[in-house]
């Protein structure tokens, strides 16, 4: 496999994150070939894929196209896949996982095509080198993706392996943590770039605060990861990867933070977890943690961003309590956050009516399967109570 050959790259992301992913791709100098509900297609080489894995904050996986072909049956699938030179891509000591998304008339589950692709790959390697890789469901080594729609099929090398939203810093979870890529998308939606104060009451395990700090420092999100799909591919060049990581390290902003990142939660255990996670991410020194009710959070004077991610409350009874909390969030914005742009991230539209403030924008995201809104509120200077 030629590591410099430019091909289509499908970068997948969670629903609602496509626009932010596009912005990221463009700012890294990648063209947008097309945009789809589950991701964006760009172009580049296997080496470009390594770069994308290091820098993308809102992506799930970076998939490098190996082959696209007409495919009308599982026999044709096997034949087409076996024609690829897998012995040059995967060593027999490696472990292989095949992921499939299939939407074709003749096949109604993706297990069988996955099996066919796996067989085609390992049979080919066995024939060429006399032994074959093990295979199974774990995606922590070599991962190959099949997409099969009607009579067209695509085979991609999944250069990420494990999802990029697994950054490796969240060692201590707390209740209802946001996925890291979603948290990064939320921060990007606010326009935060480190040149503003940012206040994060109800911070839970600290995901929004940590993602803010990574952005403020210009620290690559995957800096803590050493295991990617591409590190298990035969042509992987350790030296190029080392150089790429060194370049990223050099570009990290040094020195004391220019602006403040404040994260609070009423639950001491949440703050312990958030602090530990921030330490693992190497950004603990940038975040001011405090245990307190959100309404007592210290909001610096001037302009800034405040983001609250309250619970949504799916059980009755909880809802009544939460209605009061959402009203209190509105009061907090009005009374303590003048000059700030306030955001509430929630999956419960009924509760947002209780905030009592007019939204200036509503952005749709998905937290897992739950449709959520990031609601924006402008709090003008001059209304802050002493
Ligand atoms: C949905 S979780 C936030 C999850 C967080 N975004 C993360 O990624 O881990 C809501 C958090 O609000 C906190 N909380 C609930 N009521 C609070 C209050 N009155 N003041 C401050 N924090 C509160 C909870 O302890 C919980 O950690």
Image: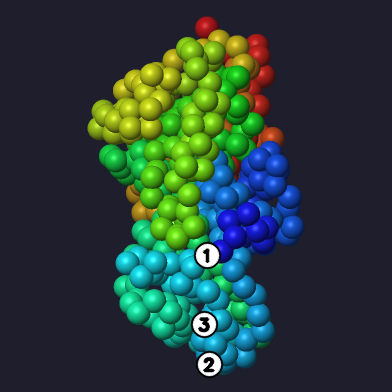
Coordinates of residue 374 in the picture (x, y in percent): 58, 42
Residue 71: image quadrant is: bottom right
Give the mark toward the camera: 1 or 3.
3
Residue 360 vs residue 144: left or right?
Answer: right
290 left or right of 360 in image: left
Query: Which sits earlier in the primary sequence, circle 1 or circle 3?
Result: 3
Q: Secondary structure at mark 1?
A: strand
SS at mark 3 in the image: helix
Q: Quadrant of the N terminus?
A: bottom right
In the rendered image of this protein, does residue 356 appear above or below residue 5?
A: above
Q: Which residue is depicted at the point 52% across and 64% down?
A: 157
On the question of residue 360 being in view, the answer is yes
User: Which label was assigned to residue 157?
Assistant: 1
Give the residue displayed 43% in from the left and 20% down from the top.
Answer: 286
Res 378 → quadrant: top right
Report whether the residue tagged 1 is closer than 8 Å to ligand 1.
Answer: no
Q: Which mark is residue 82?
A: 3
Q: Is mark 2 within 8 Å of ligand 1?
A: no
Residue underneath mark 2: 75
Q: Residue furthest front?
A: 129
Q: Is residue 116 left or right of residue 304?
A: left
- Closer to the eye: label 2 or 3: 3
Asked if 189 appears above or below 142 in the picture, the reply is above
Distance between the Cα atoms at labels 2 and 3? 11 Å
**Within-10-Å neighbours for mark 2: few <14, some 14–19, many 20+:** few
């Amino acid at each position: 496999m030629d590591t410099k050959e430019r091909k289509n790259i499908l970068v997948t992301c969670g629903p609602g994150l496509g626009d932010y992913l596009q912005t990221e791709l463009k700012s890294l100098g990648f063209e947008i070939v097309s945009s789809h509900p589950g991701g964006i297609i760009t172009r580049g080489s296997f080496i470009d894929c390594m770069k994308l894995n290091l820098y993308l904050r809102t992506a799930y996986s970076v998939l490098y196209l190996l082959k696209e072909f007409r495919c009308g049956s599982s026999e044709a699938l096997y034949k087409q896949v076996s024609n690829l030179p897998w012995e040059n891509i995967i060593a027999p000591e490696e472990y292989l996982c095949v992921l499939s998304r299939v939407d074709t008339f003749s096949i109604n589950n993706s297990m069988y095509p996955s099996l066919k692709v796996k067989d085609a790959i390992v049979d080919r390697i066995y024939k060429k080198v006399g032994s074959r890789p093990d295979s199974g469901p774990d995606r922590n080594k070599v991962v190959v993706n099949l997409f099969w729609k009607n009579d067209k099929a695509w085979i991609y090398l999944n250069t990420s392996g494990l999802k990029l939203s697994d950054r490796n810093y969240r060692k201590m979870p707390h209740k209802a943590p946001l996925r890291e890529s979603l948290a990064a998308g939320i921060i990007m939606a606010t326009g935060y770039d480190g040149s503003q104060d940012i206040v994060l009451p109800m911070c839970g395990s600290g995901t929004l605060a940590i993602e803010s700090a990574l952005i403020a420092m210009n620290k690559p999100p995957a800096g803590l990861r050493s295991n990617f799909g591409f590190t298990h591919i035969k042509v992987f060049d350790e030296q190029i990867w080392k150089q790429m990581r060194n370049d990223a390290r050099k570009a990290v902003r040094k020195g004391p933070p220019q602006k403040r990142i404040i994260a609070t939660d009423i639950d001491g255990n949440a703050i312990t977890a958030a602090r530990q996670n921030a330490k693992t991410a190497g950004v603990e020194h940038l975040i001011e943690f405090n245990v307190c009710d959100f309404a007592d959070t210290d909001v610096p004077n001037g302009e800034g961003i405040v983001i609250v991610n309250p619970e949504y409350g799916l059980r009755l009874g909880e809802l009544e309590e939460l209605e009061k909390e959402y009203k209190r969030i509105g009061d907090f914005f009005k009374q303590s956050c003048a000059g700030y742009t306030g955001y509430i991230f929630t999956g419960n539209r009924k509760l947002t009516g209780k905030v009592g403030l007019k939204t200036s924008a509503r952005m749709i995201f998905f937290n897992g399967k739950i449709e959520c809104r990031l609601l924006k509120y402008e709090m003008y200077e001059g209304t802050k109570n002493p």
